[in-house]
Image (tube, rainbow, N blue to C red):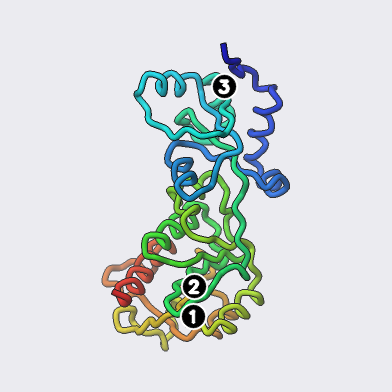
Amino acid sequence: MEDVITSRQNNLVKSIRGLHDKRTREKERRVFLEGVKLIKEALVSGVLPEKLIISEDFKNRLLAGEIIFPSGSWPVITVSDSVMEYMCETETPQGVGAVIKIPETLLRDVKVVPESLIVVLEGVQDPGNVGTIVRTADAFGAHAVILTSGCADLYNAKTLRSTMGSVFHIPVVRDVDISGLTAFLIDNGILTAVTSLDKTSRSLPEADLPRPLAVVLGSETKGVSPGICRIAGAKLKIPMEGLAQSLNVAVAAGIVLYEAFRQKL
């Protein structure tokens, strides 16, 4: 009979629990994916688990045919339901997790072509916003997402959940400094578009957004930095009618990216 890990003191359990910490993740270059959706999206994108962890309940449902889940050559380790709950950050774990090597894309790996659409997040600190924007960028055909230093951790559990697996569909560059970012945008002849309340900003429906294009979204509190605004070839404002004076950054991203997508149709 297959051994079931039942102790929180097990070395594997402790090592996976340790991946909740960003410093440990970065040191080991590993992340623990939680849930069926994320793992399946990783598999579809060719990211294979180093090990798959399943709870006893998940295994029983799998054997009973209640769940359909991909199989492969990776090791499968069964743990008790209580140990699975201990290893996961979600309040109601689905009973399956996977340890993967963190995919890494560098700025120099981003290939700019005439039709490129690149999404840049400058200092966006909320994990839910970062994850949602990555998902939105994927939906509207972005070729890459660039996160500057100071953005929420891409491999934070909340960020990952919010991407709904899109983090594995498109290249995401992390921890880019502003000088490197501006050089990349200028050297590649990319039109930089920012949202701004400046008097010179054009209403989004009236703006021309030719490719290659980078849409830059600033932090929730400070917006886009002056350094990026100085190189912006397009300053955009989203027309609104109600009393609200601003939009959530992820909502604004969705509106601007849809318009960029629409203009390409």
Residue extending farthest front: 73
Q: Is residue 150 visible?
A: no
Residue 86 in view (yes/no) = yes
Q: Amino acid under label 2? A: Val
Q: Secondary structure at mark 1?
A: strand
Of the two numbered discs 2 and 1 on the same chain, state the one appearing first in sequence. Answer: 1
Q: Could you give the CA–CA distance between mark 3 and mark 1, rounded to whole angstroms? A: 49 Å
Disc 1: CA contacts within 10 A as few (<14), some (14-19) or many (>=20): many
Secondary element at image label 2: strand
Q: Give the position of the N terminus as an image quadrant.
A: top right
| Three-letter residue code for mark 1 | Thr
Q: Amino acid at mark 3?
A: Val
**Mark 2 and mark 1: Cα distance apart in space:** 7 Å
Query: In the picture shown, does residue 105 fall above or below 177?
Result: above
User: Tag on residue 79?
Assistant: 3
**SS under mark 3:** strand
Left or right of 126 on screen, residue 200: left
Closest to the observer, 265 or 159: 265
**What is the residue that sits farthest to the top in this orientation?**
1
Q: Pick whichever, 50 or 167, lies toward us.
A: 50
Report the residue marked by disc 2.
216
Residue 34 x, y percent position in the rendering: 51, 37
The answer to which image quadrant residue 117 occupies is bottom left
What is the x, y in percent for residue 230? 55, 85
Q: Which residue is mark 1?
A: 192
Q: Quadrant of residue 125?
A: bottom right
Q: Are marks 2 and 1 in contact (CB under 8 Å)?
A: yes
Q: Position of residue 217 (x, y in %)?
A: 48, 69
